[in-house]
């Protein structure tokens, strides 16, 4: 029991020392006026912050997130094929892919996949 506490203390001490060392090494001695300004990306901070936002860019981002989440949901389906009921697995997989294909068809029908416009 005591060895667990001693090992935890040593790990905590080493990680604290490494973080302090990294913090000390990463300090810059020259302070750049441009780097300390609030906007580094070229936007003028004095102008209006309510600039028009491209709705097409937003919808393409949402489509990307949906397909990203789709991959995260499909991977476990592949892994559980050996331990689940084959009929239930097949029905669940077909329904899931059907929902995704219907959503893709709807996006295509609405013109969201026409990136050239």
Image: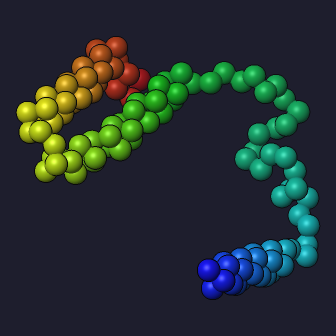
Question: 99 or 41: nearer the eye?
Answer: 99
- Residue under the point 86% across and 74% down: 28
- Residue under the point 21% across and 48% down: 80
- Residue under the point 87% across and 50% down: 37
Q: Position of residue 111 (x, y in %)?
A: 34, 18
- Report how many numbered discs are placed on residues in the image: 0
What colouring style does the render use?
Answer: rainbow
Residue 11 showing in the rendered view: no
Asked if 14 appears above or below 60 in the picture, the reply is below
Question: 85 or 16: nearer the eye?
Answer: 85
Q: Position of residue 39 (x, y in %)?
A: 80, 45
Q: Residue pushed farthest front?
A: 1
Quadrant (top left/top right/bottom left/bottom right) for the C terminus: top left
Asked if 113 appears above or below 73 in the picture, the reply is above
In which quadrant of the rendered view does residue 16 lie? bottom right
In which quadrant of the rendered view does residue 50 lie? top right
- Relative horizontal placement of residue 103, taking residue 20 as reference (left or right): left
Quadrant (top left/top right/bottom left/bottom right) for the N terminus: bottom right
Q: Position of residue 33 (x, y in %)?
A: 91, 58
Q: Residue pushed farthest left?
A: 87
- Residue under the point 38% across and 22% down: 112
- Relative horizontal placement of residue 12, taking residue 78 as reference (left or right): right
In which quadrant of the rendered view does residue 69 lie? top left
Residue 10 showing in the rendered view: yes
Asked if 1 appears above or below 51 in the picture, the reply is below
């Amino acid at each position: 029991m005591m060895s667990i506490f001693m090992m935890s203390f040593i790990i905590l001490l080493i990680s604290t020392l490494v973080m302090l060392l990294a913090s000390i090494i990463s300090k810059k001695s020259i302070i750049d006026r441009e780097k300390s300004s609030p906007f580094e990306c070229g936007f003028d901070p004095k102008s209006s912050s309510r600039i028009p936002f491209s709705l097409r860019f937003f919808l393409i981002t949402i489509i990307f997130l949906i397909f990203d989440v789709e991959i995260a949901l499909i991977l476990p389906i592949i892994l559980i094929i050996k331990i689940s009921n084959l009929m239930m697995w097949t029905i669940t997989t077909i329904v899931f892919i059907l929902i995704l294909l219907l959503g893709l068809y709807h996006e295509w029908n609405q013109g969201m996949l026409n990136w050239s416009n």
